[in-house]
Image (spheres, grey):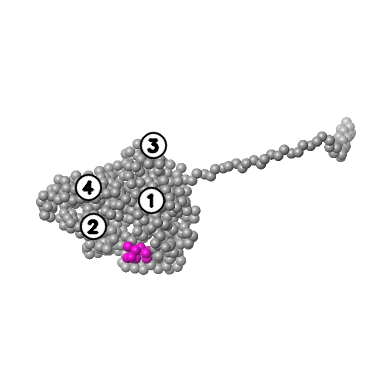
Amino acid sequence: MQYLRVCAIFLTAIFVLAACSSPAPEPTSAPVSEPTSVPAPEPTSVPAPEPTILRIATSADNKTLDPAMLTTNPDIWVDGTIYDKLLERNLDMTLTPSLATSWEPTDDLSSYTFHLRPGVQFQSGKDLTSEDVVFTFERLLDPEVGSPASSVLSTITNIEAVDPLTVRFDLSTPSAFFPDLLTAYQAKIINSQVDTQTLALTADGTGPFILEEYKSGERAVLKRNPNYWGEGPFVDQVVFYFMPSPQSRVEALKTGAVDIVYPLAPTAIADLEKASSVRVSRVSSSSYLILSMDTNQAPFDNPKVRQAVQAATDREAINKASLLGLGTVGSDIAISPNDPNFPLGVKPVAYDPARAKQLLTEAGYPDGIDITLHTSDVFPGLVEMAVTLKETAAPAGIRIAISRDPEETFWSKVWLTEPFVTVNWFGRDADSALAINVLSDAPWNESNYRSQEVDDLVLKARGQTDIAARRETYGELQKLLVENAGRIIPVFMPVFMGLRDNVEGVSAHPTNFLLLEAARVK
């Protein structure tokens, strides 16, 4: 059996080999048709992804894109997307590196050295160097330029480019606050090779977005900077719409025509909370509303008239009317009660119509006085503050006519011109808040109050590293400011922003800055 099985396997192998070695069959004579012409398939059309656009509605009081000359909210925010500063502020008001990665003072606080971030380019392609920093700050300090930041930075006596990525600032007096001053919104670093005559309408920064279009009073369009040194940006385009009506801005947010409204009036919060797909961002701040009187113009050149208005100011009523009671009552010094530098034991001037009436009599107005208060929708809460003051001052014989001026011209034709105005101020560190409008040489000294004693106290506090001593100095300063009564600060305010629910990475900032490099639209 084994033999037969082996033979069977052998025979099978022979048959297989024979089949494999057989010649191939002859082709048949049937005609072969030509191959059918089949057109190549059209490539599948894959549409490009839709660009992500962040749309922001803000007020219409825009004037210039020149960083050194910024004064209005829209221009500050547009510029903030194009340029960078050496340092930036976090939401908790601490300092964070931006174009400067680190810094150190000398032991006596009279000189500071900053180290620049390597590999940063302006949008034109030029590398950032210390020469750009020197150029920027020398321009800010140039009297012929007339930047409002000059008073804040006035302690700088020399700026030196130590090497391409190191710059040193020498100061006339020691300053514990100096790094804070570099977060001023005018202190954006510009290209040292730029034609400064073009800066009002064009821009070349190192920031996350590049200016594409700027039409004053209409809109600003910016595109993503692909060479931005930081993370982001995460949207392709940002469009600012300059809209002169606060209500129209809110309606645009509710309908989805825009994604952000900034600033947002507190009076709009309840309405937005009822709307779908909308939320409100809120943060405490040292920003404040103020009633400013020009001490050089009648009748406010009489200190008793100013003190009468001060006594006729019901701060709690203004807080309720302007901020829905969400603010903090102020004490006529530009330091928030939440600031660690706020002087201990300071109390606001009490609302006292009887005292106000007596002060008017002493000023020569026994039958009362007629004055005009200029206000505008240029910032939320100003009009409400004006109306409230008119009501609370009436029992004292102070008859107030309200001039509600257009926001497009408020900063250029009303503020620093008319003798009695409502104003808002962004939050700053204590020294900057005083230097920008209290020092005698401050370009924004809106009350025109000039006092060597005040100047000396501001400079004294600037050099004090002991916070208890600094508080005491600010307490002395507050008494002088209250006595002068040129600037009545009734309330410090939270900052509010309205957003669509699909917007992430953006929130209200305590300094009123608008930081968009982390913004996303889902």
Residue numbers of the magenta segment: 137-146
Where disc 3 sits, the SS reads: loop
The residue beneath circle 2 is: 447
Question: Could you classify mark 3 by the number of other residues whose Cα lies within 10 Å: few (under 14), some (14-19), or many (20 or more)?
Answer: few
Q: Marks 3 and 1: in contact by CB < 8 Å?
A: no
The amino acid type, in three-letter code, at marker 1 is Leu
User: How far across and how far down the image is residue 209, in percent?
Assistant: 45, 53
**Distance in Å between CA atoms under marks 1 and 3:** 24 Å
Q: Indicate the position of residue 441 as horizontal and vertical percent values.
A: 27, 63
Query: Mark 4: which amino acid?
Result: Ile
Q: Nearer the viewer, mark 1 or mark 2?
A: 2
> Residue 447 location, x and y as percent?
23, 57
Is the residue under label 3 in contact with that under label 4 (CB below 8 Å)? no
Report which residue position mark 4 lands on: 402
Kind of residue at disc 2: Ser
**Closer mark to the observer between disc 4 and disc 1:** 4
Mark 2 or mark 4, whichever is nearer to me: 4
451 horizontally vs 175: left or right:
left
Q: Which mark sits nearer the N-terminus, 2 or 4?
A: 4
Tell me the quarter of the image containing the N terminus. Answer: top right
Q: Considering the numbered disc 2 on the image, is that residue within a helix, a strand or a loop?
A: loop
